[in-house]
Image: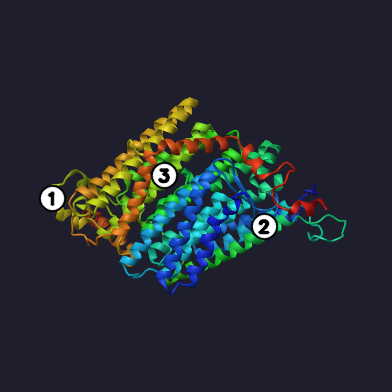
Amino acid sequence: MTLSWIVPLPILIPLLAAGAALAFGRHPRLARGIALAALSLSLAIAVVLIVVVDHNALVVDVGSWAAPVGITLVADRFSALMLAVSVAVTLAVLVYTTAQGVADEDAGAPVAVFYPTFLILSAGVSNAFLTGDLFNLYVGFEILLVASFVLITLGGSRDRIRAGTIYIVVSLLSSALFLLAIALTYAAVGTVSFAHMSTRLAEIDPAMRTIIHLALLSAFGIKAAVFPLSAWLPDSYPTAPAPVTAVFAGLLTKVGVYAIIRTETLLFPGGELSALLGWLALATMVVGILGAVAQNDLKRMLSFTLVSHIGFMIWGISTNTEAGINAAIFYAVHHIIVQTSLFLVAGLIERYGGTTSLVRLGSLAHAIPLTAVLYLIPALNLAGVPPFTGFIGKVGLIQAAAERGQTLDYILITGALIASILTLYAVVKSWNMAFWQEAESPLPAVTPTAPMLGAAASLVVLALVVSAGAGQVLRYTESAAARLMNPTHYMDAVILDDGRGHGQSDAEVTK
Amino acid sequence: MTDMAASLTLVALAGCLVAIGVYLLLERTLSRIIIGLALLTNGINVLILVAGGKAGTPPLIGRDDPRPISDPLPQAFILTAIVITLGVTAFLLAMAYRSWQLNDHDEVQDDLEDRRMANRELREAMAHRRLDDDGATVEDDAALSRDETAGSDGDPTDVDDTDAEQTEAPHQQRSEAEENAQ
């Protein structure tokens, strides 16, 4: 008896809880309890998955339809790690929102819609991480996107409708592109199961393979906000409510990065486009951070650093070595935690100061010292100041690039160092303006409540724990990267010796 | 293996739908974007149908028909995609209506922050604040600075426009004065 039955639970529990939360929409306290319980349970399952899949990947053929035809859910080390981190971060943001709702006595917050949507978002993210099927990945993307559409336009104010329009139209374009890539894939190889595609894509015409590869990368590149396709992100994220921006910043772009890692390692191993990815990574890092330096609003500044640091992960992927993929996975874990905590702290600041404009804020270090500490630690972590996770991730990336030692690698190392220094400049500049300088006019001074601080602090502490236990985490990401670079593990887990999966449909087919 | 010869009519139809869809997607009006997206995704749906190969008999288990069956997978994909597009279109229509309620039109708005970034007065206020903390010119700065994020209920376009007029006004007056002098 294997534990594979727990694999679909991180998708099912939030979905069922979303229905329950919607049914009890008139009882905010009950809806809140359901949401918290569901995500806590998901987190527990994700942590169990991390331990269980350390030896062998768990595979579930949904509805007992055998693998290449039916939908497969696969939890390997990489998925399990991303799943656990994402659910942990989602739970922290949910606690923050709950605390905010309690503090405001739900004034103006459409609770009836918020909790179910938030849970559906979590289910979509989990589905994207766990699926072993290209079309189901599309469905996972759509689930999380539609939930994010509702969250980003929450309240329907003028600014949010404007920001939401851009976000939604760009997201739908990327979905259409993804669907196009699926059509091309199916026409070329006649399957959408990752494991099956991996075998068959190696056999087709190289030109056709490159076209499919490029189509998939463009679709995922929009979602991950890779440079020429990143302009939508700083335009739309800052206007959403702080906790919504926090969960978007932490998770949605990382789902794109996850998909790119899968594409590069499982579907198209060999790195035929790694030089292109390298240049895109460079442009993303540098252009993103130049945008961040120019901003005079905290949330916008953070959105630009988000784009810039996506470049670091793409850089790790572009090296196409085990060390590079390892560093990219570690960096993704680091970045999910740190970027979410920074946006949550921006929410605390917005609550106290009534704005995130750096021109208006001031004297916060004196007024809310705890929040100041909660800002400073992840901000320095983001810039890569030792001994935090950002430093470890960047050292890993630089090592991986230097080991490969091509000209492009040294250009990328230079670009990454420039981007890191400019990140430090941007976060320290905002620190000076918001925390040290005197405010020009008195701020509203609504002190954040202890649970809100606690939720933000929990993520900061999580980042510190990962820094302290970086050896253990790196060992795990290393073994995850080793599995990714050797896709036969994945294929053997999904497709059995008879060329089909674990399901029962083969009996019908042979008849 | 199924016969992979594609129907030219279907391919041409997919091409037309995608082309018109992309054209409409580039419009500024949300309602046209919605029609564009519908055409685009339907074009791609036709392409998926083409990807499934030639049509055959219904793919049902237990039929004794010896002729080849249709590939059921692309049909499942298309059905899923249609349902998703339907939901998204409904959401977009609601948003276009909301935009019309708020602005009397459903055009995609400019990002005002970009224009604010280019606003010289604010840039100077920032530069000043960065260098100087003696508090001597707090009043000057306060007069120049403006909140970008709060007050989403107010119309930011108005603020920005008046501001642009204010910065332009002296220049225009001067040029008019110069013209009069000439």
Q: Are marks 3 and 1 in contact (CB under 8 Å)?
A: no
Q: Amino acid at mark 2?
A: Gly
Query: Residue B108, how many percent across, how many down?
Result: 45, 61
Whether marks 2 and 3 lie on the same chain:
yes
Marks 2 and 1 sit apart, C-alpha to C-alpha, by 69 Å
Q: Which residue is mark 3?
A: A335
Q: Residue under mark 3: which chain is it in?
A: A
Front-most of A107 and A150? Answer: A107
* Mark 3 nearby-residue class (10 Å; few <14, some 14–19, many ≥20): many
The residue that label 1 is drawn on is B135
Residue A193 drawn at (x, y percent): 66, 47
Foreground residue among A28 and A242: A28
SS for callout 2: helix
Residue at mark 1: chain: B
| Res A76 visible | yes
Q: Quadrant of residue A334?
A: top left
Q: Which callout, 2 or 3, points at the residue further toward the start of the chain?
A: 2
Which residue appears at 30% of the width and 44% of the height?
A377
Q: Which SS class for mark 3?
A: helix
What residue do we see at 72% from left, 46% from top? A500
Q: Nearer the viewer, mark 3 or mark 1?
A: 3
Residue type for callout 3? His
Query: Label 1's element?
Result: loop
Report whether residue B26 is seen: no
Checking the image for residue A74, the label placed there is none
Q: Is residue B116 above or below residue A484?
A: below
- In the figure, is residue A156 to the left or right of A498? left
Q: CA distance from mark 3 to mark 1?
A: 38 Å
